[in-house]
Image (tube, rainbow, N blue to C red):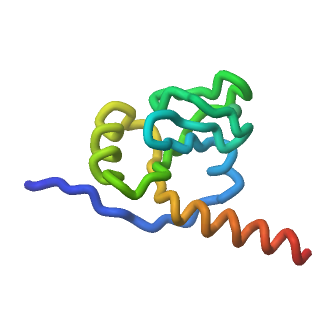
Amino acid sequence: MAKRFIRVWNELDIKDISKHLIIIGELMGSCANCSHIGLDPYLDVCPKCKTEFEYATFTSEKDRGAQFVKMRNQIPKKVFIDYSDFKRCKAEAKARDFFK
Ligand SMILES: [Zn+2]
């Protein structure tokens, strides 16, 4: 059987994701909870705010598939989410809070 990565849609809590997300750029990561930058993308816990990274995402669309495959094999415990989905949901939540 040939296994492949296929994106799956799940209903998740954007606030929970924001508290436990490492955002991975070209070389380093940043904590979505406290905005601490320069993190090793393979960290499980933020060294500043001590949040556990349960989710990971990549900012760069370039080579995103290859990055995902490489990291998925090394840190299989994290849930990988699409960065554009995260940004869209975060903006929607912010707009909703603004109009309350
Ligand atoms: Zn942090």
The percent position of residue 51, horizontal first and vertical second, equals 67, 32
- Is residue 11 depicted above or below 47 in this figure? below
Q: What's the residue at 85%, 69% (across, down)?
A: 97
Which quarter of the picture shows residue 42? top left
The residue nearer to you, when weighing 90 against 11, is 90
In the rendered image, the quadrant that contains the C terminus is bottom right
Question: On the rendered structure, is 100 left or right of 64?
Answer: right
Q: What's the residue at 37%, 37% (across, down)?
A: 76
Question: On the rendered structure, is 54 left or right of 100?
Answer: left
Quadrant containing ligand 1: top right
The percent position of residue 74, horizontal first and vertical second, equals 33, 31
Question: On the rendered structure, is 100 left or right of 3?
Answer: right
Q: What's the residue at 61%, 62% (across, down)?
A: 87
Number of labels in the image equals 0
In the rendered image, the quadrant that contains the N terminus is bottom left
The percent position of residue 62, horizontal first and vertical second, equals 35, 55
The residue nearer to you, when weighing 57 against 16, is 57
The percent position of residue 22, horizontal first and vertical second, equals 56, 40
